[in-house]
DNA sequence: ATAGGTGCAAAAGATTTGCAACTGG
DNA sequence: CCAGTTGCAAATCTTTTGCACCTAT
């Protein structure tokens, strides 16, 4: 029901797991190839889709509509706070929201209520020290590519 | 700062406003054309992009990554609960979430924290009466197209 | 053996962009 | 007038699919 075990899939799962942040299918594919792993982009997409379906990964969409994946922590359902500058993400405590969602469901009578919650901001490391208030950049793709400089374990 | 006033833009704004639910640029374009309004799809996209930028409309992405727009209520920032069966949406009280987001921001030190919150479920009208528990459909595109039957004011 | 997996090239779709013609103020 | 708009066609870009070939089990 969940598929066969193949080197490619293991590679994708491992690559995703070793990177504690959200990555796009294409980024993941690049890394795999750079690390000498022969794998097709299509396969990466399929593997990620499988993970998503089986609940093994969380997904968000960046502003451009691209899907970003991240291995889901063992304890299930999670929401994240992403840094718009460096792309790093961290799970946040979302009990309040879970309850809120449940209350809405009860109050409205809607069935099978699901929710999507995403937080984005600029982490302390990325904040232009000294500059108060809002930073000049406005949630576009980073000027050059500092935002794509997600290191992970390569 | 917000552009020139043209019949096309007015048409888009009016069409969007007269439809109290989320619509895609393409759907909106279809309706406009069906109503005898000559307008290019490109223009609809541009008008919606403008509205989004000026805060005149809220945007969500459906499961296929398509952008759906909805006129934003006069009182600003809002979150919605969408029915996965009929596509209808309703604003929900999200003070709790707003506070929660603020708290997270303060606790983590992240700056300029923004949030995205989407709730989806099956409204009472669409719930298969008699059938308890989870409906058989699993958040795919509706079997045929009952979900696209958003009436609005045509 | 054989159902499932893989990868290439091509298809699909939504959104954007180049550009020449048009128009609100 | 003329900067801002429009709309068509063509370009982008991510994700999916057709298909022939491979490989875990």
Image (spheres, coloured by chain):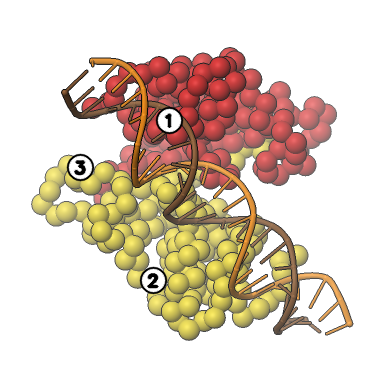
Chain colours: A red, B yellow, C brown, D orange
Assign the C terminus of chain B to one quadrant of the image: bottom left
**Can you identify the residue that label 2 sits on?**
B152
Give the image location of residue B107, x and y in percent.
59, 26
Q: Which one is in front, B119 or A21?
A: A21
Please identify the quarter of the rendering in which residue A72 is found: top left
Closer-to-camera residue (B47/A111): B47
Residue A58, numbered label: none
- Residue A136's spot in the image, x, y percent? 77, 42
Q: Which of marks 2 and 3 is nearer the N terminus?
A: 3
**Number of the front mark, 3 or 1:** 1
Q: Distance between the residues labelled 2 and 1?
A: 41 Å
Can residue A20 be seen here? The reply is no
Q: Do badges 2 and 3 share one subunit?
A: yes
Q: Residues within 10 Å of mark 1 (few under 14, many from 20)?
A: some
What's the CA distance linking mark 2 and mark 3? 28 Å
Q: Residue A43 carries which label?
A: 1
Where is residue D5 drawn, in percent x and y?
69, 73
Q: In which image quadrant can residue B56 be found?
A: bottom right
Q: In this view, does B149 lie above or below A79?
A: below
Occupied quadrant, residue B43: bottom right
Pointer 3 with pointer 1, Cβ within 8 A: no
Q: Which residue is drawn at 71% across and 33% down?
A: A145
The label number, if any, that marks residue B134 in the structure image: 3
Which residue occupies the foreground of this view, A108 or A72?
A72
Q: Quadrant of the N terminus of chain B?
A: bottom right
Question: For the residue labelled by badge 2, is the local secondary structure a helix, a strand or a loop?
Answer: loop
Q: Which chain is home to disc 3?
A: B
Q: Look at 36% across and 18% down and name the residue there.
A: A6
């Amino acid at each position: 029901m969940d598929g066969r075990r193949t080197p490619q899939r293991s590679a994708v799962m491992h690559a995703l797991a070793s990177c504690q942040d959200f990555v796009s299918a294409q980024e993941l594919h690049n890394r795999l190839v750079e690390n000498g792993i022969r794998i097709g982009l299509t396969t990466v997409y399929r593997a990620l889709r499988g993970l998503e379906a089986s609940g093994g990964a969380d997904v968000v969409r960046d502003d451009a509509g691209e899907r970003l994946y991240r291995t889901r922590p063992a304890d299930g359902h999670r929401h994240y706070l992403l840094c718009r500058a460096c792309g790093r993400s961290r799970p946040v405590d979302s009990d309040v929201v879970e309850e809120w969602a449940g209350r809405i469901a009860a109050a409205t009578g809607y069935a099978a209520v699901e929710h999507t919650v995403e937080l984005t901001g600029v982490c302390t490391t990325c904040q232009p020290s000294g500059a108060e208030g809002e930073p000049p950049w406005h949630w576009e793709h980073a000027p050059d590519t500092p935002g794509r400089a997600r290191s992970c374990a390569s």
